[in-house]
Amino acid sequence: MKFLKLSLLALVLFTATSCFDDMDDTISSSTTNVKDFVWKGMNFWYLYKSEIPDLADNRFASNEEYNNYLNNFLTPEELFESLIYQRETVDRFSVIVDDYIALEQSFDGTSYSNGLKYTLYEFPENSSNVIGIIKMVLNDSEASAAGVQRGQIFNSVDGTVLNIDNYSQLLNQQSYTLGFVDYNDNGTPENEDDFVESNGQTISLTKVVYNENPVYISSILEVNGENVGYLMYNRFNNNYDSHLNNAFAEFQASNVQHLIMDFRYNPGGSVNTASLLGSMVTGQFSGENFSKLIYNSDLQSQNSTYEFKDSFNGIGINHLNLSKVYIITSARTASASELVINSLNPYIDVVVVGDETVGKSQASITVYDSPNFTAQNRNPTHTYALQPLVAQSINSLDEAVPSSGLVPDIEVIESALNLGVLGDVNEPLLAAALADIQGSSGRFAPSIEKPFLKPIDSDLDKNPFEDFMYLDDDHSPFK
């Protein structure tokens, strides 16, 4: 038995016209209803549908066979995972959530936060002890008001020394007090005798509702008599497109000859915002193809193109008309950040400084349990939603970001013990980009962390929706 092939114009008829049109009469439990939604949503939208036999339109010969299949899975999550194509290597990003409200807030940049972004390390090697190193302090946050600085090291919460067993519980509290330490290499090049010791500093912090402006730093640097624009941009959030455009207005007014965009902690976000940013960097390619989206074989009519633009929401874009741009990356740079690099590459010289990126070129949408899978008329009995990969992003040369990530042109790996101040000309990654602008990058050798600093967790990774590249404008298949 075969499911009807549907155009998006007829999508609202999906539930009624499916070959399982009487499924609601045969499914009784709410859990099974959710599983029914999971299968139907993945059957329609999933990018790798053709690779999953259980998602074939003719997979089930009857309602009874379909019901028995669903009942083989204890939870919606278990069913969802069974439908993922090569979880470890290909689809590392599709997720199911049981609270779409939290998902929506995440995309909006809203969360409970005290403003700290840190990485936790085992210290010393083979020890259960844990230290945390502050990587970033968010603007206008509790932590910034308290004076916390990038590079500070802590090893206790509420007077309890952190270890591998207690750090998660202690740091997940809404309020806590951090105890800070100084790192001491004991005056030797060996690390076996290194230690940390309390410096007596403590800071109490509380997580509150926080809206993060992804334009973290926007500044003008002067190098050899030329103006260099520096933008640290931490997420492609369409709610802050005007802030991004304003930053480029300042660059434009300052007649910057060079631009450095810092994506080291940027996990991605809106595809439309990525195309806007690409348009701000350039300007000479208006109307040309920036990137393309390719859907599964049943949805090829929805394939679409993003173009370089001159305006958004009736607002003119501030263009720099550059032929070269520097982009700072790390092992956390993903999704829409990689899309910008990949999509600008055919048009201008893109110099990547930092570490290899994540390697994610697929886009996703939020799929709700409703007649047309949109947020309208959602099933009121649960708050499950899907965020599956639905489209492959490629540039104007039909090239995707390699799954292994983008390799930097200038390799500089951020060192936990030599972080520097973000936006400062001496910060190692920014300094490497500035040195290349001056033609002297050879003196910046790759910076390697001491091997005993083994990362075990990071607040930079706490948001489970961070690596999404999502569709949010007239290119959305829900239009």
Image: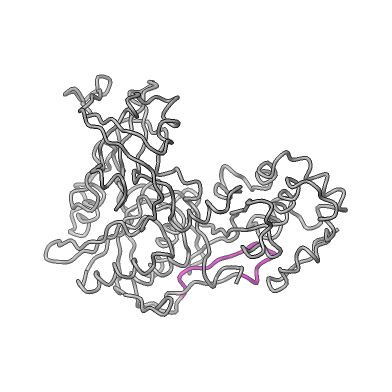
Residue projecting furthest to the left? 225
Viewport quadrant of the N terminus:
bottom right
Q: Is residue 273 left or right of residue 186?
A: right
Who's the residue at 70% across and 44% down the image?
79
Where residue 371 appears, as percent x and y from the top left, is: 71, 64
Instruction: Say if the magenta span includes residue 214.
Output: no
Left or right: 426 with respect to 25?
left
Looking at this view, is 211 or 2 the one in front?
211
Q: Is residue 174 above or below residue 253?
A: above
Q: How is the image coloured?
A: one colour
**Of 439 and 157, the residue lying toward us:** 157
Q: Is residue 349 above or below residue 71?
A: below
Q: Does the magenta-highlighted stretch encompass residue 296?
A: yes
How many numbered markers are drawn? 0
Q: Which residues are magenta?
A: 289-302
The residue nearer to you, when weighing 355 against 103, is 103
| Residue at 26 percent of width and 64 percent of height | 259
Q: Quadrant of residue 263?
A: bottom left
- Which residue is at 68% across, 71% downward? 8
The residue at 22%/74% (across/down) is 253
Residue 311: x and y in percent read 40, 78
On the rendered structure, is 250 left or right of 76?
left
Q: Position of residue 398 (x, y in %)?
A: 52, 66
* Quadrant location of the C terminus in the rendered image: bottom right
The image position of residue 127, as x and y in percent, is 38, 20
Vertical side of 172 occupied by 439: above or below:
below
Relative vertical location of residue 221 with respect to residue 254 in this rendering, above or below: above
Q: Quadrant of residue 192?
A: top left
